[in-house]
Image (cartoon, grey):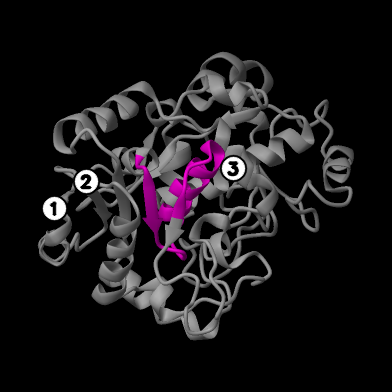
């Protein structure tokens, strides 16, 4: 679901789900949407991430290898059943009716059709698994899955959507320690740091400020937990509720927090990742007295930007963004400090709270 940040949340949940059921996880390609192209592109999992670290946690195999070596034997075309919680309406059916067999319509829409077509997969039937759910950390969910869908009768579970929640379930956040960038991504990130940033500690910041984000932040008053906000507010809002400033910090908030970091630390540069406005000139002018370099990656590459942010000496992210959440989880797994814009909410807390304690 969604773009890379959301997909990463779903991946961690799927990894935890596979481990809970003691089934090998077929590593799916990442879905990318490119400008002026109607259909999504499917990028092999190992293009961005190493597979070996994941094998330290559980059995995995890339989709490409699975389809080439195992599918012909254990998942031949005549036995390919799609799994969904309940029947999905077909977008091809203008009357809004469901498939004749009340099925999953697994290839309806984008990225569903392009995803399965990448591997020449068609389905001969559908299986609705309600009321089973994905939470294998509580109760007997895993036991119930294996009772209903024993590996001997159902060697492959092919889901219409990821068997995981968004945002990532709290119990699965720690699995990020097994998600390691591939060598090309790591090398590109390190090359940028070496060439463009002084050989000294630097701050990495994420500014989410595109028009789609502006519209998303308008929903803050309607919800206590929007998108990835549990990463700083807690899954039960034990650290507060989302505010417009957390979702869309203004220039004053951004500059004030950066000034505070620069006063307290020996930073000589700031790396900015953004979906729209990097504010390079505004930041350089406002922070002139600190004599810091403010840089962005050109041309933009979100995966390399994520890797650079993960390598920073301090990271400031957006509490609500799944892109920021990716960086925060990676840094948590390595014990590196992070903070969020406008959090904690200074208006509602009188005591001092360390930004990185959550």
Residue carrying label 2: 268
| Among numbered discs 3 and 1, the one appearing first in the sequence | 3
When the figure is inspected, residue 260 is found, relative to residue 137, above or below; the finding is below
Q: Which mark is residue 12?
A: 3
For mark 2, give the secondary structure: loop
343 within the magenta span: no
The reply, left or right, for residue 83 in relation to residue 113 is right
Residue drawn at x 69%, y 59% as measured from the top left? 86
Would you identify the image quadrant in which residue 194 lies? top left
- Tell me where the magenta segment starts and ends, as one range: 312-338
Q: CA distance from mark 3 to mark 1?
A: 40 Å
Instruction: Give x and y (percent) for residue 168.
Output: 60, 53
Q: Is residue 61 left or right of residue 295?
A: right
- Residue at 48% in and 42% down: 336
Work out whether mark 2 precedes mark 3 in sequence or the reverse, and give the earlier one: 3
Residue 329 among those drawn in magenta = yes
Q: Nearer the viewer, residue 355 or 161?
A: 355
Q: Do callouts 1 and 2 mark residues in contact (Cβ within 8 Å)?
A: yes
């Amino acid at each position: 679901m969604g773009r890379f940040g959301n997909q990463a949340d779903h991946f961690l949940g799927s990894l935890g789900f596979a481990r809970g059921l003691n089934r090998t996880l077929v590593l799916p390609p990442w879905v990318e949407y490119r400008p002026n192209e109607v259909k999504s592109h499917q990028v092999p999992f190992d293009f961005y991430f190493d597979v070996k670290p994941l094998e330290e946690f559980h059995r995995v195999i890339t989709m490409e290898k699975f389809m080439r070596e195992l599918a012909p034997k254990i998942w031949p075309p005549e036995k390919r059943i799609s799994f969904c919680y309940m029947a999905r309406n077909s977008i091809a059916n203008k009357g809004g009716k469901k498939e004749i067999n009340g099925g999953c319509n697994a290839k309806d829409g984008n990225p569903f059709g392009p995803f399965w077509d990448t591997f020449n997969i068609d389905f001969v039937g559908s299986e609705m698994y309600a009321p089973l759910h994905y939470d294998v950390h509580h109760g007997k969910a895993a036991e119930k899955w294996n009772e209903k869908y024993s590996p001997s009768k159902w060697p492959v579970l092919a889901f219409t959507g990821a068997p995981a929640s968004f945002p990532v379930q709290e119990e699965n956040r720690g699995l990020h320690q097994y998600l390691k960038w591939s060598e090309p991504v790591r090398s590109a990130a390190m090359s940028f740091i070496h060439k463009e940033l002084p050989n000294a500690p630097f701050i990495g910041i994420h500014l989410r400020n595109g028009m789609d984000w502006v519209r998303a932040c308008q929903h803050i008053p309607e919800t206590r937990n929007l998108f990835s906000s549990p990463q700083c507010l807690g899954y039960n809002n034990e650290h507060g509720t989302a505010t417009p400033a957390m979702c869309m910090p203004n220039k004053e908030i951004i500059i004030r927090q950066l000034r505070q970091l620069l006063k307290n630390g020996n930073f000589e540069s700031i790396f900015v990742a953004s979906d729209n406005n990097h504010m390079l000139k505004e930041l350089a002018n406002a922070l002139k007295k600190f004599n810091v370099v403010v840089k962005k990656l050109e041309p933009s590459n979100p995966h390399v930007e994520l890797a650079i942010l993960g390598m920073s000496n301090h990271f400031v992210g957006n509490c609500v963004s799944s892109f920021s959440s990716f960086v925060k989880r990676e840094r948590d797994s390595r014990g590196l400090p992070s903070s969020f814009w406008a959090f904690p909410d200074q208006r509602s807390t009188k005591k001092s709270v360390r930004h990185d304690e959550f």
